[in-house]
Image (spheres, rainbow, N blue to C red):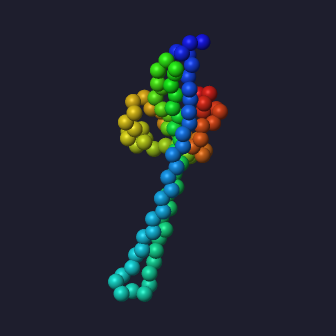
Amino acid sequence: MGAVRLFNVDETAIETKREHKKVDVAKGSKNVWHRDIKTHFHLSFVACGSAYGYVIPPLFIFPGVSVSEDVFGTCQISGAGVTTTEKAFLTGSLFAR
């Protein structure tokens, strides 16, 4: 087996946790309302390259059942794949595909 057939695969996760607090109040009012906006997002991507230097376009894995077509249009990496799994992790069945 030569360097052309020897590949390394790595899965990396990106996780964002963002918490915003927004306060809505009329000036002078004692009745104050606030909203806590919490965004939690997990994204994995898989990179693969050979010892020979051949690089396969990455695969982005989103959580859930489906992904909006807008995601495909905003990806600027030629040939990149986009898919979903329940928790956005690479699974055995996804790896086999």
Please provide percent x and percent y for residue 20.
45, 65
Q: Is residue 63 above or below residue 59?
A: below
Front residue of this view, candidates 83 and 95 = 95
Horizontal side, residue 75 vs residue 94: left or right: left
* Residue projecting furthest to the left: 27
- Please tell me whether residue 1 is drawn above or below residue 23 in the rendered image: above
In the picture, the quarter occupied by the C terminus is: top right
Q: Is residue 42 left or right of residue 91?
A: left
Would you say 20 lies left or right of 11 here? left
At a point 39% along the width and 30% down the height, the residue shown is 78
Residue 65 seen anywhere in this rendered image of the structure:
no
Task: Using the image, determine if residue 54 lies above or below residue 9.
Answer: above
On the question of residue 50 being in view, the answer is yes
Q: Residue at x 56, y 33 (%)?
A: 10
Q: Nearer the viewer, residue 85 or 40?
A: 40
Quarter-wise, where is residue 13 in the image? top right
